[in-house]
Amino acid sequence: MKRTTCLSIASALLLVLSTSLAQAATTIRMQVDGLVCAFCGSAIEKKLRSHAATDDVLVSLEHKVVALSLKDGQDIADDTLRSQITDAGYQVKKIERVSQSLDSLRAELKGKAHGGR
């Protein structure tokens, strides 16, 4: 009985922890193929900004990265993002939620563009 109780408590703690981490991730980072010009970036940025949950958007043609920060307590489903970007003619390779801020991601990508890391 003690073992079952311990397993139940451990499972509950893991659930709470994973939920907290998911809520802390306020940036969605995507690897997108097909971005070749500023017009491509502008089209995707406009589409993503149309979501009420979107706070800010970053498009890096050089790194094939599209990222958006979310407003507190908001989210956009991966399927919705994938569909919108695919419908616009681009291929989504990866979608991930990260706790990194959009400003930090901008700085990271800028550093890579100027010979950093």
Image (cartoon, rainbow, N blue to C red):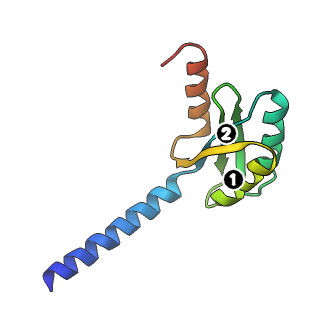
> What amino acid type should be assigned to the residue bearing mark 2?
Val
Of 32 and 23, nearer the camera is 32
Q: Nearer the viewer, residue 89 or 56?
A: 89
Residue occupying image coordinates x 69% and y 53%? 82
Picture layout, residue 64 above or below residue 96: above
Indicate the amino acid at tag 1. Arg
- Dot 1 surroundings within 10 Å: few (below 14), some, or many (20 or more)? some
**Considering the image in quadrants, where does the N terminus appear?**
bottom left
Q: Which mark is residue 32?
A: 2
The residues tagged by marks 2 and 1 sit, at their Cα atoms, a distance apart of 10 Å
* Depth check, front residue: 74 or 63: 63
Residue 84 seen anywhere in this rendered image of the structure: yes
- Residue 82, numbered circle: 1
Secondary element at tag 1:
helix
| Residue under the point 42% across and 61% down | 18
Task: Residue 97 in the image: state x and y as whole percent.
Answer: 54, 50
Left or right of residue 111, residue 85 in this image: right
- Residue 6 occupies which quadrant of the picture? bottom left
The residue under the point 20% across, 81% down is 4
In the rendered image, which quarter is residue 109 located in?
Answer: top right
Q: Which of the two discs, 2 and 1, labels the residue nearer the N terminus?
A: 2
From the top left corner, tell me how far across and down residue 20 is, in percent. Answer: 45, 61
